[in-house]
Image (spheres, grey):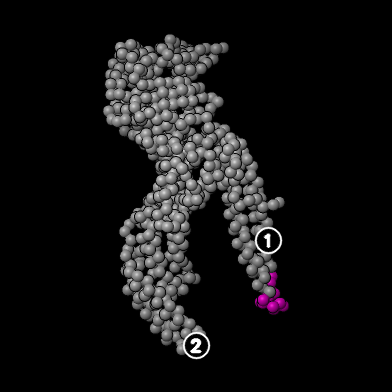
């Protein structure tokens, strides 16, 4: 079996193929490479074991029975050391091939609509007070975040979550669209970023590291460096004099006393530096690897070019600066090794480590947060680019400065399989500004609300949308779809709903205009109060310039449309009974639904009504 190429992954030309062909080819190559390195690791492991046995036998013969010269032990010893190094490298290549395989398996799972439950659900970002996150499945199992989140750093995930929770200004959206469009064909780059580095640290760890890096550096005069260096050199010279001449231990002891006095005088300044540097530098491993993937890339889009420019600040690549920090921290931690501790004391190791750490912090500390944020934003853009690559039929929306406007053709829900999603057209502007949507149970009303809301989230985050075409102005989403009561808070379902409605009304009073999505408005009260309350809420929202959709089972609410002067319109979904089974076509139609399926559904489950 011949060894595969070091750069495991698809060839550059694969990015021009359709996603499935590229992922299938990449998976086959990665599986082959993983099997190769697994077999090679087993072979090297067995060879190492045999070499260790030979080393024991040679050692016994050389030192136990004295039947061979001691020099013979060098051969198996060197061979064992070489095999230990080789085994580690083989294991690293096997681990890399495994990560590549998982990358393509996850991509194929998304293409096959098997992605739910495999990725990061983003539950940590859930906020019941958010005006739409829970209603529109932004986070949680099978959510928008899980579909999009190929991010693996804390900063990248945080940035993506923020984009899904907060609409961006038009110019920012256009910049992201251009960046995502440029990153979309760069499959090889996204692969390298996905498999780079180790697992990311927690946000707490990263926060501690950023706090340490951004704190003012402790000023240590350069004379301290020369004094410490001179004291160490003097102690080494005294030790050499003792060992190599007949001067005895006096010179060494004298030098050691001088060095100890210097170390003691510097202790109050050195110890705080070393203690403050007890930071989880390992949390930056993936960030450093991500930046290494980006540093050699050339970008044309303004956003990516700006992010790339922000990495060139110290005259050295950020990944190199991170590696230097890792080495300094390793050097600091070496003092704790019981075998190295005496040597560390002799060399004033802690003092030199403190000086080097402060020099790094003075040079790079102010830029660390910028590097981390840049890496996170690029990773979040790559997540959107992966989604765009895997859904080439999904276009970028047209962002309209005026408005308010939502005009979609062939809208589908991005969380539904493409083969199952029924597409509908929908337009909200001046006439009509809002829709009253009636229909039977299970006919598609709630799904339509989520379709409009999810595509609005994607559009205003800078991502492609599930539609043939979408024109949209800046909007603030406010939804009341998934309302639950709270036993702990003593809040009924109706109270929870009207509290959310108050939030929707408050949002509609700000800029940009609101897009309200209200499912079964005020269905927790009687028909009379519902009619009066719903009409007042809807009219108030429309008067404030909001766009929206209200669904209802109560056909009395559809009667408010004729008096709205064209600002409201009735639309509906239908169903029909076929061979005793309820059938839905999920096609949106104009007008008011003319029949209900509630009794038929009750009879279908065996209720005698």
Residue 157 location, quadrant: top left
**Horizontal side of residue 411 vs 32, given as left or right:** left
Q: Which label sits in the foreground, 2 or 1?
A: 2
Front residue of 472 and 355: 472
What residue is disc 2 on? 245
Residue 47 is labelled as 1
User: For the point 39% across and 27% down, which residue is it?
Assistant: 472
Q: Position of residue 579 (x, y in %)?
A: 56, 12
Residue 138 location, quadrant: top left
Front residue of 97 and 121: 97
Figure check: 568 above or below 236: above
Number of other residues with Cα within 10 Å of mark 1, as a class: few under 14, some 14 to 19, many 20 or more: some
User: For the point 38% across and 80% down, which residue is it?
Assistant: 257
Q: Position of residue 104 (x, y in %)?
A: 57, 41
Q: CA distance from mark 2 to mark 1?
A: 46 Å
Q: Is residue 70 magenta?
A: yes
Residue 240 appearing in the image:
yes
Front residue of 554 and 200: 200
User: For the point 62% across and 45% down, which residue is it?
Assistant: 30
Region rendered in magenta = 57-71
Figure check: 379 above or below 361: above
- Sequence-wise, which precedes: disc 2 or disc 1? 1
**Horizontal side of residue 526 vs 310, given as left or right:** left
């Amino acid at each position: 079996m011949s060894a595969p190429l070091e750069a495991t992954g698809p060839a550059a030309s694969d990015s021009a193929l359709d996603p499935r062909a590229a992922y299938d080819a990449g998976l086959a190559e990665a599986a082959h490479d993983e099997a190769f390195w697994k077999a090679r690791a087993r072979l090297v492991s067995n060879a190492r074991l045999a070499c260790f046995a030979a080393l024991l036998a040679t050692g016994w013969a050389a030192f136990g029975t004295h039947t061979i010269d001691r020099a013979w032990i060098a051969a198996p010893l060197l061979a064992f050391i070489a095999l230990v190094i080789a085994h580690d490298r083989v294991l690293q290549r096997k681990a890399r091939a495994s990560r590549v395989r998982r990358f393509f398996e996850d991509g194929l799972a998304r293409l096959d609509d098997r992605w739910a439950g495999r990725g990061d659900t983003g539950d940590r970002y859930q906020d019941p007070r958010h005006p739409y996150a829970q209603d529109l499945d932004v986070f949680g199992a099978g959510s928008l975040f899980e579909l999009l989140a190929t991010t693996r750093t804390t900063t990248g995930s945080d940035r993506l979550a923020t984009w899904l929770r907060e609409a961006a200004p038009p110019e920012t959206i256009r910049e992201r669209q251009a960046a995502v469009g440029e990153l979309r064909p760069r499959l090889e780059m996204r692969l390298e970023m996905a498999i780079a580095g180790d697992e990311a640290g927690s946000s707490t760890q990263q926060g501690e590291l950023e706090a340490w890096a951004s704190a003012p550096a402790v000023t240590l005069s350069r004379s301290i460096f020369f004094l410490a260096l001179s004291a160490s050199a003097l102690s080494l010279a005294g030790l050499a004099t003792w060992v190599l001449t007949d001067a005895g231990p006096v010179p060494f002891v004298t030098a050691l006393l001088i060095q100890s006095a210097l170390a003691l005088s510097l202790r109050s300044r050195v110890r705080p530096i070393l203690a403050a540097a007890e930071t989880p530098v390992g949390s930056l491993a993936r960030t450093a690897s991500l930046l290494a993937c980006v540093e050699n890339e050339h970008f044309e889009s303004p956003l990516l070019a700006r992010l790339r420019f922000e990495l060139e600040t110290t005259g050295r690549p950020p990944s190199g600066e991170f590696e230097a920090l890792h080495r300094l921290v390793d050097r600091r931690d070496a003092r704790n090794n019981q075998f190295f501790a005496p040597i560390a004391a002799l060399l004033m190791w802690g003092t030199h480590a403190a000086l080097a750490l402060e020099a790094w912090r003075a040079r790079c500390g102010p830029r660390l947060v910028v590097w981390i944020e840049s890496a996170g934003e690029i990773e979040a853009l790559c997540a959107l680019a992966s989604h765009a690559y895997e859904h080439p039929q999904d276009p970028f929306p047209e962002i309209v400065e005026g408005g308010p406007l939502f005009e979609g053709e062939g809208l589908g829900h991005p969380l539904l399989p493409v083969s199952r999603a029924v597409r509908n057209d929908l337009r909200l502007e001046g006439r009509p500004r809002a829709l009253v949507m009636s229909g039977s149970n299970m006919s598609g009303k709630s799904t339509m609300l989520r379709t409009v809301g999810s595509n609005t989230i994607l559009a205003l985050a800078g991502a492609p949308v599930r539609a043939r075409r979408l024109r949209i102005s800046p909007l603030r989403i406010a939804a009341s779809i998934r309302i639950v009561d709270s036993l702990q808070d003593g809040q009924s379902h109706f109270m929870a709903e009207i509290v959310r409605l108050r939030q929707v009304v408050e949002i509609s009073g700000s800029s940009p205009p609101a897009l309200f999505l209200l499912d079964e408005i005020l269905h927790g009260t009687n028909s009379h109060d519902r009619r009066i309350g719903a009409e007042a809420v809807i009219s108030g929202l429309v008067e404030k310039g909001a766009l929206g959709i209200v669904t209802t089972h109560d056909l009395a609410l559809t009667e408010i449309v004729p008096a709205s002067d064209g600002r409201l319109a009735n639309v509906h979904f239908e169903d029909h009974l076929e061979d005793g089974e309820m059938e839905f076509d999920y096609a949106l139609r104009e007008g008011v639904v003319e029949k209900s399926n509630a009794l038929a559904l009750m009879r279908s489950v065996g209720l005698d009504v």
